[in-house]
Image: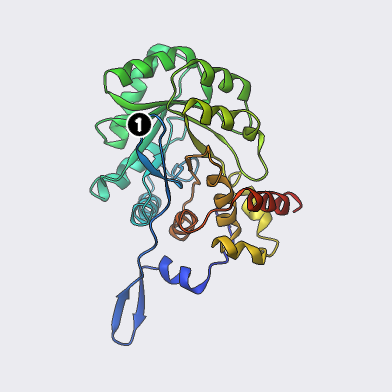
Amino acid sequence: MHTRRTLLTGAMAVGGIAALSRAGGAQPAAPAPAPLTKSIPSSGEALPVVGLGTWITFNVGNDAALRDECAAVVAAFFAAGGRLIDSSPMYGSSQPTIGYALQKLGRPEALFSAEKVWTSSPRNGPPQIAQSLASWGVPRFDLVQVHNLLSWEAHLDTLLAMKEAKQIRHVGITTSEGRRHRDMEAIMASRPLDFVQATYNPVDRELEARILPLARERGIAVIVNRPFREGELTRKLARHPLPGWAAEIGAMSWAQLVLKFIVSHPSVTCAIPATTRVDHVRENLAAAAGPLPDEAFRRRIAEAIGHI
């Protein structure tokens, strides 16, 4: 994430800067195309197919300069048409960093807030969620997920009761890095979930076997975490030239090609790359605009990346 090498065209570079200096004065940049959206199956609400993760990147403590950098990322995210921001109590100071950014931006109405409950104690779940609300500064969360299936039975009962009481809008579960997929599958088959979140990209494709088909069958939205393997994948790809055929679907960088592969899967609702950089968040949202690959093109992407 921090060292990604982009290969943007001149037009996209123009769209990614705040203004152009001209002899007659500064002119605003051309507006970016609106990102593609997919509907949450259980509610019908449309979400842009690229969101914003905050693992590691927003854990900046009380460093004023770094908090302002994160606020700039959030501002660029909303300006590009983004909505879903995901966090967790596990992510250090990420929650208050999000709250700081939202307050600084006047609390954008477009926000779709995705939080998690992460505690081994079931009775500590509700107070933890209340603390997360206070950190974000929002009246209620659009989505609360059981993080990494920790004490999932009790927490899921709590979340479903909160949804019934209209204290939260959607309920989900998460895992990452290929862990506990069988447990996730069993929960998906037996409990009324709105969302699941797991790792998926052209290298990590285990979800294609069972989780993604089951999500489609059960009407469950899918959030994809670690799309770039925390930057490991894009750093590796950056050592190789981007294939010329990537331009056929409007991908001007490896990061955009990876994101287009992910969000083009029919069962995937939203991918949540994390970043500390304004240019990267604009690049990521730009991947959500324009054409997406069909199944044959998806195979081409997976084969090309798999051989690197």
In this picture, residue 163 sits left or right of residue 191: left
**Image: 292 above or below 134:** below
Q: Which colour scheme is used?
A: rainbow
Q: Is residue 180 visible?
A: no
Residue at (47%, 53%) from the top-left corner?
288
- Residue 169: x and y in percent read 32, 28
Residue at (27%, 18%) from the top-left corner?
165
Which residue is farthest right? 307
- Residue 218: x and y in percent read 49, 25
Q: Which amino acid does label 1 sit on?
A: Ser
**Image: 77 above or below 157:** below
- Residue 26: x and y in percent read 30, 78
Q: How many marks?
A: 1
Which residue is farthest bottom? 23
Residue at (33%, 15%) from the top-left corner?
161
In this rendered view, identify the residue nearer to me: 295 or 260. Answer: 295
- Residue 50: x and y in percent read 46, 47
Q: What quarter of the picture does the C terminus occupy?
A: bottom right
The residue that disc 1 covers is 43
In this picture, residue 135 sits left or right of residue 233: left
**Element type at marker 1?**
loop
**Image: 148 above or below 51:** above
Residue at (32%, 43%) from the top-left corner?
111
In this rendered view, identify the residue nearer to me: 59 or 227. Answer: 227
Q: Is residue 134 visible?
A: yes
10 Å crowding of disc 1: few (<14), some (14-19), many (20+):
few
